[in-house]
Image (cartoon, rainbow, N blue to C red):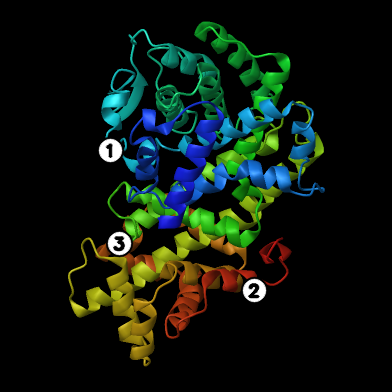
Amino acid sequence: MTRQTKETIHQLMEEQTHVLGGNLSHNPGAVDRIVDCGDMETRCFHDNQHFLRIMQAWDHAYNAEPDDQTPDFKGVMGQFPKELQDSVKASMIRAAARHDMIYHHMDGKFPPGMDDMLAPYVEERDVDGKPALFIKDVLPDDAIAGAALTLFGFKPGDKLDPYNGQNEFLTAIIAGHEALADGVPKKNALAEMAIIEGTVPWGKADRFDVLAGRLQEAAKALGVSFSEAETDAYMYGAVEVANVDVGAFRSCAKEFLKGTWKLMKEGEAAAGDPELAKPGHLYDQAKKQYGFMSFLCGQSESGEKQVFHGYKNYPPVEMVRAWEEKTQRNITDIQLPVLDAITVANALVTGMSVQRMCERGDDVPNIDLYQALADYFHTHSSKVDEVQLHLSNITSHPIERVAAMLVQEIPHDEIHRLAGQIREHGADTFLNPEKVEAFLNQESLSRPQFLVAQQLHIPQANWQERMTARVGNSEWEVGG
């Protein structure tokens, strides 16, 4: 994380805490705990740069010129008194700073110092031989925890789902306590928690109407209240933060794919492999991403759940629908084909490297993908110096480049079929020296193998540029 990013987060938190009548000096280390989460080595996407981008959502939205893809946030907030607008802005920025502090299923643990903070509320239990987080059956008499249960619709003893509010729920508990320690009024602490609940991805179309009702209910338990206008103002802010948080889903192809790769790297970082160096790890991540994104796309198409949301026609229903359609196109036309291509590229490059190592009598077990690539490059390329330079200055994963070439050169239905076979049989088909020969001898792999071998002779341009060159698919164009 850059020093400037850290300083900006500190500055924004200080300014907005002051707006709400609080003072960070009352809570030493409050902002350091935020940036320490974003600095965790497992964070490739949900890092401090991401925190800061969401913290700046108010300014970007408020100053943006409305058009068919940009809602009129300034207009919708302009109906409220300036004091309320300032309060919503402060709550949005403070909630955004903390909204991804807990990311347990990716980090593989709680951030430093937060085990003790969460110990009264959550515990790990064994479920079918695997650890899972549960809300404790008996909770302390804690108004903030009670408010979190209400906002999220949870109850003591519930099993927490990483994809249905687990991280946001635990983050909201911490954020609520931290807000009170910062000297922020209970009402604003609760608003911050509600905004964090709004960042739980993919929910039903009426989720912010439901959240508005829960906010009123939680407020009563805390001895505060929200008028109808105040509820609306905070819900508009929550919707804006939530939609910016998942904005990559409706971005242009290049940005969408960058996010995909970062999420895959983040998914493996907890396994001790942040660079996706092991072929089996990369295979597992591509498979998980494919399954999850296929499920998400199906939910979106059926209308069961949405990625983007609105509240009382902000953003307009038609705009949200257009964003959902863009998301579906990004997933079906871009992300799933790329995940297919990554699966095939990983299997081919690794399998061909394993085959070559077997021929040379080298030890194959637990092979490192970079070493396998280097071996293959050195064996087949006459331009060793150029290849060495290429490997020492990698700007993106080498498998990305091979995958880009496959997407461009081979029809997707063929890649999809090959990827399906590989996913069905598992990584063992291309990692096992006893199986790799039969795997590579399949007739369907002859042309892809030829293309991969051809590509590995000469370093290729950045993979996203290769993707953009895909003929007949305007989705690859910048800003498409």
Return the disc, 3 or 2, that comes first in the chain's sequence.
3
Residue 80 tag number:
none
Where in the figure is residue 231, as x and y percent of width and height?
A: 67, 19
The residue at which mark 1 appears reads as 112
Where in the figure is residue 53, as x and y percent of width and height?
A: 55, 48
Going by the numbered disc 1, the residue's amino acid type is: Pro
Q: Residue at x 27, y 29 (%)?
A: 115
Where in the figure is residue 336, as x and y percent of width and height?
A: 57, 54
The residue at which mark 3 appears reads as 431
Return the disc, 2 or 1, that comes first in the chain's sequence.
1
Apparent side of residue 249 relative to residue 282 in the rendered image (left or right): right
Apparent side of residue 448 relative to residue 105 in the rendered image (left or right): right
The CA distance from mark 2 to mark 1 is 44 Å
Return the disc, 3 or 1, that comes first in the chain's sequence.
1
The CA distance from mark 3 to mark 2 is 31 Å
Q: Residue at x 64, y 74 (%)?
A: 469
The quarter in which the C terminus is drawn is: bottom right
Going by the numbered disc 2, the residue's amino acid type is: Ala
The residue at which mark 2 appears reads as 469
Q: Residue at x 62, y 34 (%)?
A: 89
Q: Secondary structure at mark 1?
A: loop
Q: Residue at x 53, y 59 (%)?
A: 258
Going by the numbered disc 3, the residue's amino acid type is: Leu
| Mark 1 crowdedness (10 Å alpha carbons): few <14, some 14-19, many ≥20 | few
Front residue (pair 189, 122): 189
Q: Is residue 465 above or below residue 279?
A: below
Q: Kindly indicate the quadrant of the structure image that contains residue 337.
A: bottom right
Where in the figure is residue 263, as x and y percent of width and height?
A: 46, 50
Q: Is residue 333 visible?
A: yes
